[in-house]
Structure formats: C-alpha cells, structure tokens
Image (cartoon, rainbow, N blue to C red):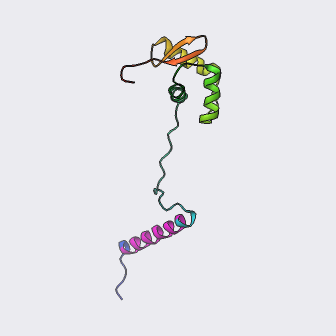
Amino acid sequence: MPPVERDDLLNIMEKLAEAQLQAVRKLRGEEGRPQEAKPRKVKSNISVVIDILKTAGGPLHINEIIAQAASAHGRTISRESLVSALTKRVLDKRVFCRTAPNTFGLIERDGE
C-alpha cells in the first residue's frame, strides 16, 4: 500500500470531522442550521417604538409605549431615556411628532 500524502490525510480528517459534526447536529435536531450562526440583529428602542406606533395606528402616551415595549417586545425601556430620544426626533421633525404632553405619533409621509 502506498504511503498516504499529508494533504490526503488532512482531507480525510476534515471529512471525518464534518461527518461527526453533522451527526451531532442531527441528534440535537439542528440539521438545517448553518455551520456558523450569524449574530442576531437587535432592534433599537426607536425601531421598537416605530413598530408599536405603526401597529397602534395613531399616537400613544409614553406610558403605553413603554408598556407595549415590555409586553410585546420583551424590552424594558427607561422612560427618561425614551422621552429624550423621541423629543430630539420631534424637534428635528424626523419620524415622530408630539400630539399632546408625553404623547407621540409618527409623522405621516407620502406613500405610507
């Protein structure tokens, strides 16, 4: 039998390792999982508020926004921090408007 080349041996070892990994994933029920899981993107608090206001279809008081962020999105948001962030965007006339004290809505854009 001829001697095994280094590259051939490494290829065999690689195939064996891939087969073992596939077997472990199959036992765990993770067959379709990619080899390297991509990190999940986390939504910003502002993105969560936009989702909440779109779903509501109108302005909401900050207390309701915070309550929905917790219940629907599992997100705990600091009231002061959120009011500050929303107020900055209201003053910049970007995305949000203030319809009453501590009540925020989305600025309506053409085509939305």
* 57 relative to 92, above or below: below
- Which sits in the foreground, 60 or 11? 60
In this rendering, the answer to whether 110 lies above or below 76 is above
Question: Residue visible at 45% across and 56% down?
Answer: 34
Number of numbered discs on residues: 0
Q: Going 62% across and 20% down the picture, which residue do you hit?
A: 62
Predominant SS of the magenta segment:
helix
Q: Is residue 29 above or below residue 61?
A: below
Rendering coords of residue 91 (x, y %): 49, 11
Q: In the picture, residue 18 is in which quadrant?
A: bottom left
Q: Is residue 31 left or right of residue 102?
A: left
Where residue 31 appears, as percent x and y from the top left, is 49, 62
Quadrant placement of the N terminus: bottom left
Q: Which residues are magenta?
A: 8-25
User: x and y percent of residue 102 in the render?
Assistant: 61, 14
Q: Name the quarter where the C terminus is drawn.
A: top left
Q: Within the magenta stretch, is there residue 68?
A: no
* Residue at horizontal 50 percent and vertical 45 percent from the top: 39
Residue that lies at the very extreme toward the bottom in this rendered image: 1
Up-down relation of residue 8 to residue 49 (above or below): below
Q: Residue reaching furthest front?
A: 57
Q: Position of residue 9 (x, y in %)?
A: 40, 75
In the depicted view, which residue is nearer to us: 44 or 100?
Answer: 100
Q: Quadrant of residue 76?
A: top right
